[in-house]
Image: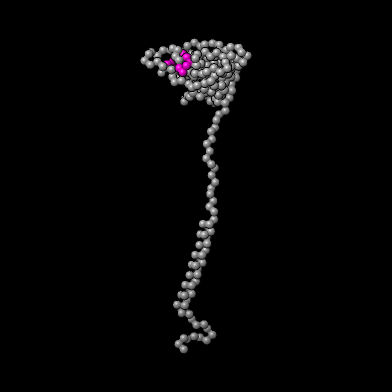
Amino acid sequence: MNDRYIFQKPPRRSHYSAFRARLKILIGAMVLIGVIAAFIYVNLKASPKVVPQTSPEQNITISTPMQTFVNQYFKFSDTGKWVLDKATTANKIVYIEYHGEEIQGQLDVYVNQVPIPLYLAVPRVLPVRLINDNSFQVTGVSDPCGDQYGTEPHREKDVTINGATMLCDPDNPQYEVVVGQIGGDYLLHLKRTDGTPISFVIIYLDQKLDPDPQTIVNIAGSFQAL
């Protein structure tokens, strides 16, 4: 015979047979890896996606509660911190608005008295209507009264804006407002809770860097004779 071998020993495999064996092992390993990869891919794709939970968008408005300030003659409400000033007298009630230590406004209420023109003349008016002889229905704060002058000299005088008469200081740069009755003027005739007549002149000075009408609208809209 051509094939030579030693008794009781297996014949040597050819190099080709060894290569075929290694190739089968390699192919088997690759098939196994492919099966595992396909299994992982299918399971990952089939598993439900975790959607992160997000809270719905909300618009939250933080509003400052109204506080009521009371004295023997009247009461009013506002969101600011008002303190009765030591300059208060029997005929002039003075409140100061504070934000911390900073003064933001001043409210002067003259009781049964009309102030001199130096204090009465202001650049703006808040026209109001009388309700039940002891409170007001408010409208809106006017533009500066100097707009009413045209080409005439700027001097203090009575002008009527939106039905309310005021003493106008056309060159006053401050945000100062007098409350004026529609069909009347700055002298507001009301009645106390016991029916006693009482009159008020209400003047507000806004001292904030960015003044606005809301404070005096709050005050006048909640003002009530007591």
Residue at 38% in and 13% down:
153
- Residue 131: percent from left, percent from top: 56, 18
Q: Which residues are magenta?
A: 161-173
Report the coloring of the rendering.
one colour
Judge whether 92 appears above or below 19 on screen.
above
- Residue 129: percent from left, percent from top: 52, 18
Check residue 163 for magenta coloring.
yes
Judge whether 8 appears above or below 170 on screen.
below
Judge whether 31 appears above or below 3 on screen.
above
Query: Residue 74 sits in which quadrant?
Result: top right
Check residue 68 for magenta coloring.
no
Residue at 54% in and 32% down:
62
Judge whether 30 appears above or below 118 on screen.
below
Residue at 55% in and 29% down:
64
- Residue 202: percent from left, percent from top: 52, 16
Considering every residue shown, the one lying at the far right of the view is: 194
Residue at 48% in and 72% down:
24
Query: Residue 66 sits in which quadrant?
Result: top right
- Residue 17 visible within the image: yes
Q: How many discs mark residues in the rendered view?
A: 0
Depth check, front residue: 99 or 166: 166
Residue 123 horizontal side relative to residue 58, left or right: left
Depth check, front residue: 107 or 138: 138
- Residue 122 visible within the image: no
- Residue 87: percent from left, percent from top: 55, 15
Q: Quadrant of the C terminus?
A: top right
Residue 222 horizontal side relative to residue 174, left or right: right
Considering every residue shown, the one lying at the far bottom of the view is: 1
